[in-house]
Amino acid sequence: QLQLVESGGDVVHPGGSLRLSCTVSGSATDISWFRQAPGKEREGVSCISWSDGRTNSADSVKGRFSVWLDYTKNTVYLEMNSLQPEDTAVYFCAAAIHRLSASPGCLKPIFYDYWGQGTQVTVSS
């Protein structure tokens, strides 16, 4: 059974930075970060292919967020910079077991089979 555990959520001021972690137990082909704000649909943020490290990100976070994988720790990180109030959401990591290879589909929740419990990120002055 594949398991995901997120950590790193916090309250930060606008313009601040955070790093989220997703530790993976089990085998996955792709890991993606999603977020969901109150009253909104779940949104794909950034994804990474486990086999070759290729990534893809939503236009709303390009240039501000980056995703990478530490194979020695089986952990995927989401580095978030220049945070804005609209980035406030619960952030989830999810694992796919059918290769997506960082294609645009990698940001769609329907392709993911396992989900973490989520971590809250609040950006507020």
Image: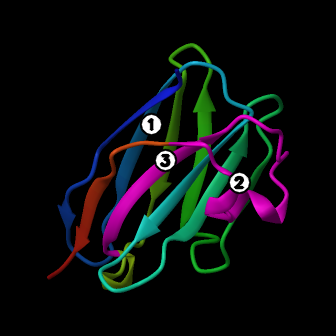
Mark 1 and mark 3: Cα distance apart in space: 6 Å
Disc assigned to residue 22: 1
Disc nearer the start of the sequence (1/3): 1
From the top left corner, tell me how far across and down residue 63 is, in percent. Answer: 62, 70
Q: Which residue is mark 3?
A: 93
Q: Secondary structure at mark 2?
A: helix
Q: What amino acid does circle 2 point to?
A: Phe
Counting other residues with Cα less than 10 Å from the Cα at mark 1, is it few (<14), some (14-19), or many (20 or more)?
many
Q: Is residue 58 above or below residue 106?
A: below
Residue at 66% across / 72% down in the picture? 58
Q: Residue furthest top?
A: 72
Give the residues drawn in magenta, as a range: 88-114
From the top left corner, tell me how far across and down residue 87 is, in percent. Answer: 38, 76
Q: Which of the two marks, 1 or 2, is nearer to us in this view? A: 2
Counting other residues with Cα less than 10 Å from the Cα at mark 2, is it few (<14), some (14-19), or many (20 or more)?
some
Left or right position of 99 against 61: right
Disc nearer the start of the sequence (1/2): 1
